[in-house]
């Protein structure tokens, strides 16, 4: 999103090639580089070198600020690895951030309790308020939906493909400690995380594997019988 706001487009050509910053050299998951690719392909295939290269071009603080604007409250450290998600956040924060693109660019405030009543039925508490207002321009929402739709249609998240327009992103941390898939349709956003509470590596679980498949099962059940609606900027 920060890159789009800086003027890049899905068709912008970027280099998927070795890059070293202060002695740190990120590698792609498949340990191969594809050369010149479009930003769309880089996002869809989760090309780490491109993510870092673009982050350095846009500015790490700009990227961190974009995350905060989407609702990520945890501190995002401006290390070069910021582009790869090295800062820890909660699943709730991450899912709420993706909800911004699902609902047209308006920030959301996640909550779990709508109201509390006493034994007599009187309301003791009722949740009020909406969200944080528009935090992303409509044109950038539409473009982000296109990029993240490519992830599901033919990229690393293809195991999450539904019978309706959907978008999302896979994630896998170092040594397979964390694997997640966050995705959304025009009606619902959901996040799936898999890992071990003590931080030990999993049996090589990746975000495009079990998390994406589980997300698909959840969404198919949740949206069964609901009308198919297009995402903003994505054809139905």
Image (tube, rainbow, N blue to C red):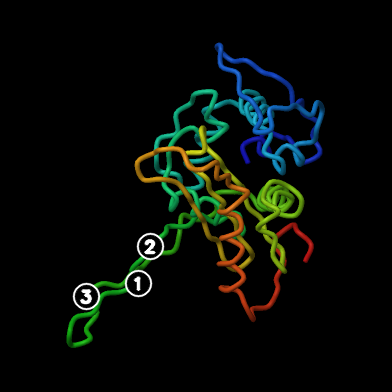
Q: Earlier in the sequence, mark 2 or mark 3?
A: 2
Q: Nearer the viewer, residue 35 or 117?
A: 35
Circle on res. 111: 2
Q: Position of residue 230 (x, y in %)?
A: 72, 66
Q: In the rendered view, would you say 158 is above or below 40? A: below
**Residue occupying image coordinates x 67% and y 51%:** 157
**Residue 213 found in image quarter:** bottom right
Q: Nearer the viewer, residue 181 or 202?
A: 202
Find numbered disc 2 in the image and state the secondary structure of the residue it sits on: loop
Q: Position of residue 179 (x, y in %)?
A: 52, 45
**Residue occupying image coordinates x 70% and y 73%:** 228
Q: Position of residue 223 (x, y in %)?
A: 60, 74
Q: Which residue is mark 3?
A: 124
Badge 2 crowding class, 10 Å Cα cut-off, few under 14, some 14 to 19, many 20 or more, is few
**Residue occupying image coordinates x 69% and y 32%:** 30
Circle on res. 178: none
Q: Which residue is mark 1?
A: 114
209 sits to left or right of 178: right
Q: CA distance from mark 2 to mark 3?
A: 17 Å
Q: Position of residue 47 (x, y in %)?
A: 69, 34
Q: Earlier in the sequence, mark 1 or mark 3?
A: 1
82 sits to left or right of 137: left
Q: In the rendered view, would you say 215 is above or below 226? A: above
Q: In the rendered view, would you say 101 is above or below 74? A: below
Find numbered disc 1 in the image and state the secondary structure of the residue it sits on: loop
């Amino acid at each position: 999103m920060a890159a789009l706001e800086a003027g890049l487009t899905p068709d912008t050509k970027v280099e998927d090639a070795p890059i070293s910053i202060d002695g740190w050299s990120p590698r792609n998951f498949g340990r191969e580089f594809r050369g010149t690719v479009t930003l769309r392909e880089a996002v869809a295939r989760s090309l780490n070198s491109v993510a870092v290269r673009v982050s350095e071009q846009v500015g790490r603080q700009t990227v961190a600020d974009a995350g905060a604007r989407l609702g990520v409250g945890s501190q995002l450290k401006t290390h070069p690895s910021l582009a790869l998600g090295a800062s820890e956040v909660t699943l709730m924060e991450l899912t709420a951030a993706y909800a911004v693109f699902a609902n047209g660019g308006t920030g959301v405030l996640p909550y779990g309790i709508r109201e509390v009543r006493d034994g007599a039925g009187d309301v003791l508490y009722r949740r009020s308020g909406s969200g944080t207002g528009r935090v992303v321009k409509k044109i950038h929402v539409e473009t982000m939906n296109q990029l993240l739709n490519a992830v599901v249609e033919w990229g690393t998240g293809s195991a999450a493909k539904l019978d309706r327009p959907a978008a999302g992103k896979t994630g896998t941390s170092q040594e397979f400690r964390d694997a997640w898939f966050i995705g959304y349709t025009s009606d619902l956003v959901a996040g799936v995380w898999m890992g071990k509470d003590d931080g030990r590596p999993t049996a090589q679980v990746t975000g495009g594997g079990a998390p994406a498949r589980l997300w698909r099962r959840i969404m198919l059940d949740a949206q069964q019988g609901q009308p198919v609606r297009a995402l903003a900027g994505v054809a139905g």
